[in-house]
Amino acid sequence: MNKQPKIEMKETKNLVDKKELNLWKRGFTPQAEIWNGRMATVGIGIIFIIIALISQFSQ
């Protein structure tokens, strides 16, 4: 029986300081991803409000 060698992989995490999370940075950075998520959530909320208002007044 062939035994495969055990491969150990160490995970490295680049943690971002909590003060830097709200900075407005461009590119593929953790800060940009956080702001993208926030803006997407706001946009979806606004769409739901518009749909609710349209359906309320179209009857």
Image (cartoon, helix red, strand yellow):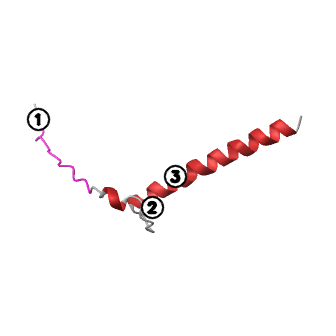
Apparent side of residue 56 relative to residue 11 in the rendered image (left or right)? right
Earlier-in-chain disc, 3 versus 1: 1
The residue that disc 3 covers is: 38
Q: CA distance from mark 3 to mark 2?
A: 10 Å
Q: Measured from the top left, where is residue 53 in percent x and y?
A: 78, 41
- Residue reaching furthest to the right: 59
Residue at 71% x, 43% y is: 49
Q: Nearer the viewer, mark 3 or mark 2?
A: 3
Which is closer to the viewer, label 2 or label 1? Answer: 2
| Image spot of residue 47 (x, y percent) | 69, 46
- Sequence order check, earlier mark of 3 and 2: 2
Which residue is disc 1 drawn over? Answer: 2
Asked whether the residues under the numbered discs 3 and 2 touch, taking CB atoms below 8 Å apart as contact, a structural biologist would say no
Q: Nearer the viewer, residue 2 or 11?
A: 11
The structure residue drawn at horizontal position 22% and vertical position 53%, both measured from the top left corner, is 12
Q: Main secondary structure of the magenta part?
A: loop
Q: Is residue 16 left or right of residue 58?
A: left
Q: Amino acid at mark 3?
A: Arg
- The region drawn magenta spans 2-14
- Marks 2 and 1, the one that precedes in the sequence: 1
In the rendered image, the quadrant that contains the N terminus is: top left
Q: Secondary structure at mark 1?
A: loop
User: Is residue 3 found inside the magenta-colored segment of the image?
Assistant: yes
Return the residue at label 2: 32
Q: Amino acid at mark 1?
A: Asn
The residue carrying pointer 2 sits among few (fewer than 14), some (14 to 19) or many (20 or more) residues within 10 Å by Cα, namely some
Residue 10, image x and y in percent?
A: 17, 49
Residue 56: say if magenta: no
